[in-house]
Image: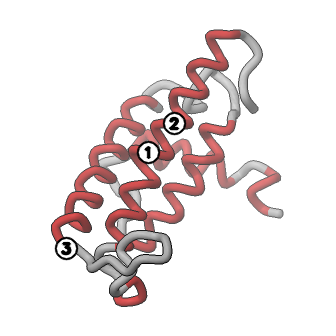
Amino acid sequence: MLGVTSLDKAEIADWHWRIEFEGFMPIAESFRNSSVAMLHRALPGPVNYEQIPQLAERGLSRLRQFLCDLDEQLRDRDFIAAEQLSIADIAAVVTIDFARIVKVRLDDRHPNLLRWRSAMAQRRAMSL
């Protein structure tokens, strides 16, 4: 799941980082700055912070760009990194599914992601 060769490990680590920071974090940014449930809780921790609607919009913009970038990465590929199923694929499934919380779903602008996500759904571990 983390790669075998040094090059594989580096590519997987790079994409895992990108998925977390360019995909998942924008979802959190958007959610925490737009959800009524997060009113006065725009940042985690013991101090209350007000929501900033512009940060919610920025998060959505960042997420949309990330999905386009990831779609391009998956052109002619079965897996995100190193030609193998990896932690990057797992993190991406979670991120893409979690994007629903900010009402972002894959569509016809993401043909490679749709193909990849469908293939991921067929894996035995996804049905447990």
For the residue marked with disc 2, what is the amino acid? Answer: Trp
For the residue marked with disc 1, what is the amino acid? Answer: Phe
For the residue marked with disc 3, what is the amino acid? Answer: Pro
| Along the viewing direction, whichever of 115 and 35 lies nearer the viewer | 35
User: Which residue shows up at 16% across the image and 67% down it?
Assistant: 54
Point out the residue furthest to the left here.
54
Image height check: is 68 above or below 122? Answer: above
| Along the viewing direction, whichever of 76 and 105 lies nearer the viewer | 105
Per the image, the residue denoted by label 1 is 21
Mark 3–mark 2 Cα distance, whole angstroms, equals 26 Å
Secondary structure of the residue carrying tag 2 is helix
User: Which residue shows up at 42% across the image and 64% down it?
Assistant: 28
Q: Quadrant of residue 16?
A: top right
Per the image, the residue denoted by label 3 is 53
On the image, the x and y values in percent for residue 59 come to: 29, 59
User: Which residue shows up at 76% across the image and 16% down it?
Assistant: 4
Mark toward the start of the polypeptide (3 vs 1): 1
Quadrant location of the N terminus in the rendered image: top right
Secondary structure of the residue carrying tag 3 is helix
